[in-house]
Image (tube, rainbow, N blue to C red):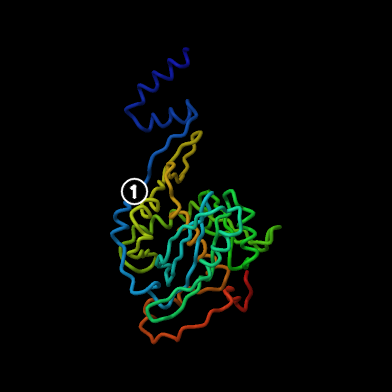
Amino acid sequence: LTAWRQIITDFLQAISDPSKLKTLVHTTLDEAWDESEGEQIEPDHLFARREHYAAEVPVDSCVLTAAVDTQDDRLEIDVVAWVAGEESYRISFERLYGDLSRSEIWDLLHKRLTRQFVSASGAIHDVKLTTIDSGGHFTDEVYSFCKKYGPRQFIPVKGHSQAGKPVVMFPRKRNDKGVYLTMVGTDTAKEILTNRFRIMTPGEGYMHWPVSDQFDETYFQQLTNERRKVVYRKGRRQIEWDAGGRRNEPFDTAVYNLAAVRLLQQHFGINLNRYRKDDDTAPAAPPKKRKSGKVHKPAGGWL
């Protein structure tokens, strides 16, 4: 009883001083104290930035990646075109509903990921690399899909929420399931993306979205639902990301697409500086025929 009286007395004395109250909460009560840090991204501001693309793919000189988020009853697919400086153009965002324990939805996913996209000049683009969330309830199905259709083109990823980790940690060899399970530094990726949301001028790091029903108000709300928070656990200050129970799949696929383009640059021999918007003024090459869909293997090897 005496201890609780002292706690109440300390609480009443600290309530007007956030720093003292914070100390009381995470030392005396051994509870986490959290506070939002940084300016909140307003989804309406991003929605207002949508553009009318001249074609499905608005630039001719680009490289495409895709990311897939796995949920219990659906797959969410995000396709992005990248140019120099990691300036990005969202191309497509769609949901496939079905039973992820059955092969039908995975067959449909493969069809969606291997379709071709056309730019204004008629140039045809394939998705070079796809990252697929393997951290949910269907890890075995994700592994099986990646191994079946090409473990160097379809990469299973798993989030690693720890400050300071690189965006991607690509393994030197396959795991015992025959796939390149890649860890994603989600905290780092989310910091990068949140900073890019604030970039207002096209160029390095800028993010473009098309005027499309796929990118509606709900999409942008879910894209910005996560909050960067400072928490104190047992006296230690930590940064955490929290959606507060709200849906955030577009943010997750944005993280996985950033991981995909980093994989292409760091491990798959892609020089993103070769893909520049200025090149779109050059005469377009004739449409190319469908290739095998495999990622080109550079002369120096994959790793």
Nearer to us in this view, 113 or 227? 113
Q: Is residue 147 left or right of residue 130?
A: right
Q: Is residue 66 left or right of residue 205?
A: right
Quarter location, residue 231: top left
Above or below 268: residue 234: above
Quarter location, residue 279: bottom left
Where's residue 137, x and y in %?
59, 48
Q: For mark 1, what is the residue?
A: 40
Nearer to us in this view, 105 or 34? 105
Residue at horizontal 38 percent and vertical 55 percent from the top? 219
Residue at horizontal 47 percent and vertical 12 percent from the top? 1
The extreme right residue here reads 176
How crowded is the residue under tag 1: few (<14 C-alpha within 10 Å), some, or many (20+)?
A: few
Where's residue 57, x and y in %?
40, 73
Residue at horizontal 40 percent and vertical 19 percent from the top? 8
Q: Amino acid at mark 1?
A: Gln
Q: Quadrant of the C terminus?
A: bottom right
Where's residue 298, x and y in %?
60, 77
Nearer to us in this view, 152 or 16? 152
Nearer to us in this view, 121 or 279? 121
Where's residue 125, x and y in %?
47, 75
Q: Is residue 189 left or right of residue 277?
A: right
Please tell me how many numbered marks the rendered image carries. Answer: 1
Above or below 24: residue 141: below
The extreme top residue here reads 1
Check disc 1 and report its element: helix, strand or loop.
loop
